[in-house]
Image (cartoon, rainbow, N blue to C red):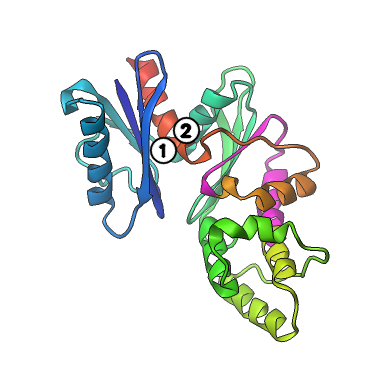
């Protein structure tokens, strides 16, 4: 059997595939400061739950902390992993937007080979990432899981002009002082993320079928505003957080 483990900057994901590429089990947990410990705990949990030993599985790591674990058999980049993983759900995928905790990625997949042929990553600034959304939800005092629904209630989207997280937070405080409704501010936050990621996507000439993955893909407002900016519909996998881990396992499986 095959295990893929995607150790992200904020969240660690682990999945178990059988020889027929069926998704048997998965776990998700905050990465915290100790990538190695969190990954090992998830690994032992999934083995125990499925009555497996280490010798029964082939482990492939990916993500920000892929080099931190010593029980891996293989490791691959998250770009390659996501490119493969989205095709588990959508075999005809041609483009990928992955918004993670500390970076956002745009990936182009070859129509002929199904392999990644180009990508671009925003990893120098928190704007356009899950961390940006977390900071803004704290500023609004709204649970992050409620942010998307709140934004879609807006009748008048507030303008968030700052692309820097620190300055954007200050801008939100100024909007509070002006008595701007929370839903309008939330809409402005989501629109800001979408504009930043869509700009990178357009430079990469993304086209349908475009798959949106990563934890932020669960946010309905980010999806909506991305579609507005790009001008076409995007799709989300059944388990958008797991595409990297699934891709990691599939790549090693195909090599066996």
Numbered-mark total? 2
Where residue 86 sits, quadrant-wise, is top right
Residue at position x 74%, y 74% in the image? 181
Q: Would you say residue 13 sits in the magenta stretch? A: no
Q: Position of residue 221 (x, y in %)?
A: 68, 52
Helix or strand or loop: what does disc 2 sit on?
helix
Q: Nearer the viewer, residue 87 or 163?
A: 87
Cβ–Cβ under 8 Å for marks 2 and 1: yes
**Which labelled disc corresponds to residue 230?**
none
Would residue 17 be found to the left or right of residue 239 on screen? left
Residue 18 x %, y %:
35, 18
Picture quadrant where residue 158 is located = bottom right
Please state the horizontal and vertical placement of residue 36, each as a whole percent of the image.
Answer: 24, 49
How far across and down, in percent of the image, does residue 236 sit? 61, 36
- Is residue 64 visible in this depiction of the protein? no
Work out whether residue 110 can be spotted: yes
Q: Residue at x 77, y 63 (%)?
A: 154
| Cα distance in 3D space between marks 2 and 1 | 6 Å
Vertical relation: 41 (above or below) 73 = below
- Height in image: 152 above or below 109? below
The magenta-colored residue range is 192-215
Residue under label 1: 77
- Name the residue tied to disc 2: 80
Seen at 41% across and 35% down, the residue is 245
Give neighbour class at mark 1: few <14, some 14-19, many 20+ (Cα, 10 Å).
some
186 sits left or right of 17 in the view:
right
Work out which quarter of the rendered image holds the C terminus and state it. top left
Q: Residue at x 25, y 27 (%)?
A: 50
- SS at badge 1: loop
Is the N terminus in the top left, top right, bottom left or bottom right quadrant?
top left
Badge 2 density bin: few <14, some 14–19, many ≥20, Cα 10 Å: many
Q: Is 202 inside the magenta-drawn segment?
A: yes
């Amino acid at each position: 059997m095959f295990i893929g483990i995607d150790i992200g900057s904020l969240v660690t994901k682990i999945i178990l595939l059988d020889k027929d590429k069926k998704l048997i089990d998965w776990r998700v947990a905050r990465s915290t400061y100790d990538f190695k410990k969190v990954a090992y705990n998830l690994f032992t949990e999934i083995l125990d739950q499925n009555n497996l030993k280490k010798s029964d599985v082939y482990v492939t790591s990916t993500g920000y902390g892929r080099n931190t674990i010593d029980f891996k058999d293989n490791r691959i980049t998250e770009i390659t992993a996501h490119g493969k993983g989205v095709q588990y759900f959508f075999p005809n995928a041609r483009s990928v937007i992955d918004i993670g905790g500390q970076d956002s990625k745009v990936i182009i997949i070859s129509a002929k080979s199904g392999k990644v042929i180009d990508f671009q990553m925003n990893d120098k600034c928190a704007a356009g990432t899950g961390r940006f959304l977390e900071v803004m939800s704290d500023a609004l005092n709204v649970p992050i899981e409620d942010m998307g629904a709140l934004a879609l209630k807006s009748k008048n989207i507030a303008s968030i002009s700052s692309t820097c997280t620190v300055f954007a937070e200050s801008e939100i405080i100024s909007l509070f002082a002006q008595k701007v409704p929370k839903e309008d501010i939330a809409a402005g936050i989501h629109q800001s993320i979408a504009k930043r990621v869509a700009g990178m996507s357009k430079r990469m000439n993304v086209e349908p079928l475009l798959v949106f993955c990563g934890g932020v893909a669960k946010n309905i407002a980010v999806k909506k505003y991305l579609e507005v900016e790009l001008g076409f519909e995007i799709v989300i996998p059944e388990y958008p957080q797991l595409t990297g881990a699934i891709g990691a396992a599939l790549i090693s499986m195909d090599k066996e």
